[in-house]
Amino acid sequence: MASKVRDILQRPRGLIGRSILVVAAIVFVQLAASVAFYQAIDRQSLREDHARRIAELLVVGDRVSRLSQADLDQVMTSRYLEAEVVAAPPQAPSQARAQTGEADAIVRYVRQWEPGLARRPLRLWSEDQSDGGRDLVGAMGLSDGRWLSFRSRHFPRPWPIALRAVATTLAFSLACVALGAYALRQLGEPLRRLAEVAGRVGEGPPQPVAVEGPPDLAELGRAFNDMQQRITGLIEDQARAMEALSHDLRTPLARLKLASDYVEPEDIRAMVGGNVDELEEMLRSLSAWLRAQHAASTAEPVDLPALIRAVIARWPRLVRYEGPRTLTLSTHRDPLEQALIRLVDNAVRFGGKAKVRLVVDDPEGPRIEVLDQGPGLTDEVLARIYEPFFRGDAARARDTGGFGLGIPTAERLLKRFGGRLTIANRDGGGVTASVWPPAGED
């Protein structure tokens, strides 16, 4: 629940986040309008209530004004009301005279409730007390020339009542926003899964999305699954066609290889034979890269140190291993092995020597690092390192062989089964290729 609240409070970037923002904005606009409405209604209700009470007070006071002063005080005075007949009207303080809007409104209501008081002089104002209370003070002229002075202590203000209504409305609005956000997130969950799977189309085996949600989203899921199958089929058909073509090209190359033995002179024969060998190596690299697009594999328990030692055995005295003696992980053996072979081969070609290190304290899982001793790569080369057939100018200038397919093939093999490959320059020189093996079911 806390994570959902954090998601809601974060800056909205997707369709669902913006929809939640719109719902929240509508609810809070409605809340602000309700607050203003409650305040206006509450203010008017309080004015009318004060007016009725004061009107009754004044009518009764006018009728009993002929009583003696003591009798009047006893009849009219209560716990919250003080009344007395005075010869001259009390004067409002300067602060009260500056805030006469509320009192004038009550005076108008008094005269509406009791038309008989319309011709009587009536003065009314409010005074703030030191204890935080507020008194309503006033005076009305009597028929005999005297004044009926009164003070209503601690008459209610409009905001305490409005605040209760605001608090209730705010709680209800927040509940509506939370329910709306939850409903929108639930409705948007299929879209999020669809976006995640769409970003991986072509990188691995098809991953059908669950057909669920409203009819429109369910139909979108079915259409996406069909499209994914078609795209995957096209990619695999293209890869198999190119693989078959490269395989068929080996037959005429083999005949050229045999025919080159009869070519004279010796230097021409060596040149033809070398070009045929280079073409065969290129076709093998191309076939491996194409097969990586539709390779199949099953996860199994693999002893990573043993697998790494088997890989580096191809380059004795040029590659050394550093790490634990044994560590078993459920992974895809063949794709991981083929990827490591290409990464180590690339490190030996361009660095002369290499080191393979197994890191076990990575929070993301065991990490295999292939470190070469070369000069490093430029930013331009690093940006294009995963492009098929790409070789940096420094690599092309050196007689290192290769066709720019080793790293792209390794990356495709790892990514297809859920692994990851990153390549970066190392402080002090050299390049580090970091491999997170594709994880399988435990």
Image (tube, helix red, strand yellow):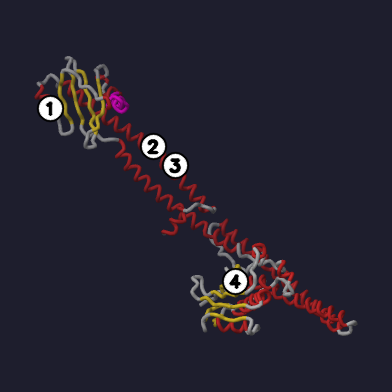
- In magenta, the rendered stretch is 96-107
Alpha-carbon span between mark 4 and mark 2: 65 Å
Residue marked by disc 4: 432
Label located before the other in sequence (1 or 3): 3
The residue at the point 24 percent across, 17 percent down is 120
- Type of amino acid under label 1: Val
Regarding mark 2 in the picture, which secondary structure is present there?
helix
Residue marked by disc 2: 36
Q: Is residue 98 magenta?
A: yes
Alpha-carbon span between mark 3 and mark 4: 56 Å
Q: Position of residue 126 (x, y in %)?
A: 26, 29
Q: Quick one: 142 or 269, which is closer to the camera? A: 269
The residue at the point 52 percent across, 50 percent down is 18
Name which quarter of the figure residue 39 lies in: top left
Label located before the other in sequence (3 or 2): 3
Crowd band around label 3 with a 10 angstrom C-alpha radius: few (<14), some (14–19), many (20+): few
Crowd band around label 4 with a 10 angstrom C-alpha radius: few (<14), some (14–19), many (20+): many
Q: Quick one: 70 or 311, which is closer to the camera? A: 311
Label located before the other in sequence (1 or 4): 1
Alpha-carbon span between mark 1 and mark 3: 51 Å
Q: Position of residue 236 (x, y in %)?
A: 69, 70
- Type of amino acid under label 4: Thr
- Type of amino acid under label 2: Ala
Residue marked by disc 3: 29
Q: Which mark is residue 75?
A: 1
Alpha-carbon span between mark 3 and mark 2: 11 Å
Seen as rendered, the residue at the extreme top is: 144
Asked if residue 427 is positioned above or below residue 10 in the image, the reply reads: below
Alpha-carbon span between mark 1 and mark 4: 99 Å
Label located before the other in sequence (2 or 1): 2
Asked if residue 154 is positioned above or below residue 319 in the image, the reply reads: above
Q: Position of residue 346 (x, y in %)?
A: 66, 75
